[in-house]
Amino acid sequence: MTENRVEKFKKERESLNETVLKYAGLNLKRFYSLDDQIYRDGALPARTKELLGFVASLVLRCDDCILYHLYRCHEMNLTDEEFEEAVTIGLAVGGSITIPHLRRAFRAWDELNEKRDKK
């Protein structure tokens, strides 16, 4: 079975993070830790926080960030309808310049759904 775009991204992200942390000083390590901690359950559930991260990433047009939050949302069993609404919010806030990014997001979402449906 061939690896899809999301699987390749996850492997590359992990490898790159290992390289960064090999050289990271205290402040960079603290930021990485903070970034991990803020998406955990708190006053807002982790699922909501990942959705917020996804929408913010779409508005900022950061493809790596979009893909990361997208697969985290998928792992948290976000429905297709919830995903579509989040994309629409990102489009409304970010404008038409986000359209190329939302196209790639929907393609990745579709790949994750296909993989899940084959199980």
Image: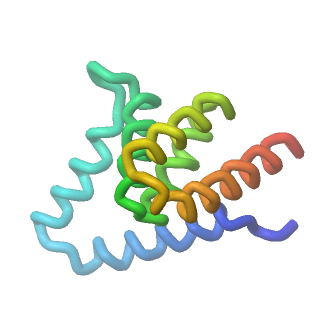
Q: In the figure, is residue 83 to the left or right of 119? A: left
Q: State the image coordinates of residue 64 (x, y, percent, origin top left).
A: 46, 65
Work out whether residue 68 or residue 41 is closer to the camera in this orientation and state it: 68
Work out whether residue 30 or residue 69 is closer to the camera in this orientation and state it: 69
Q: How is the image coloured?
A: rainbow
Q: Residue at x 67, y 56 (%)?
A: 108
Q: Residue at x 41, y 62 (%)?
A: 61
Q: How many marks?
A: 0
Is residue 92 placed above or below 107 in the rendered structure? above
Is residue 100 placed above or below 93 in the rendered structure? below
Q: Residue at x 54, y 48 (%)?
A: 70
Q: Quadrant of the C terminus?
A: top right
Q: Quadrant of residue 85?
A: top right
Most extreme residue toward the left, as rendered? 27
Work out whether residue 20 or residue 73 is closer to the camera in this orientation and state it: 73
Q: State the image coordinates of residue 67 (x, y, percent, origin top left).
A: 53, 57
Is residue 92 placed above or below 111 in the rendered structure? above
Q: State the image coordinates of residue 95 (x, y, percent, origin top left).
A: 43, 52
Is residue 58 placed above or below 20 in the rendered structure? above
Most extreme residue toward the top, as rendered? 43
Q: State the image coordinates of residue 30 (x, y, percent, origin top left).
A: 16, 56
Q: Residue at x 87, y 66 (%)?
A: 1
Residue 86 in sight: yes
Residue 10 in sight: no
Q: In the figure, is residue 93 to the left or right of 85? A: left
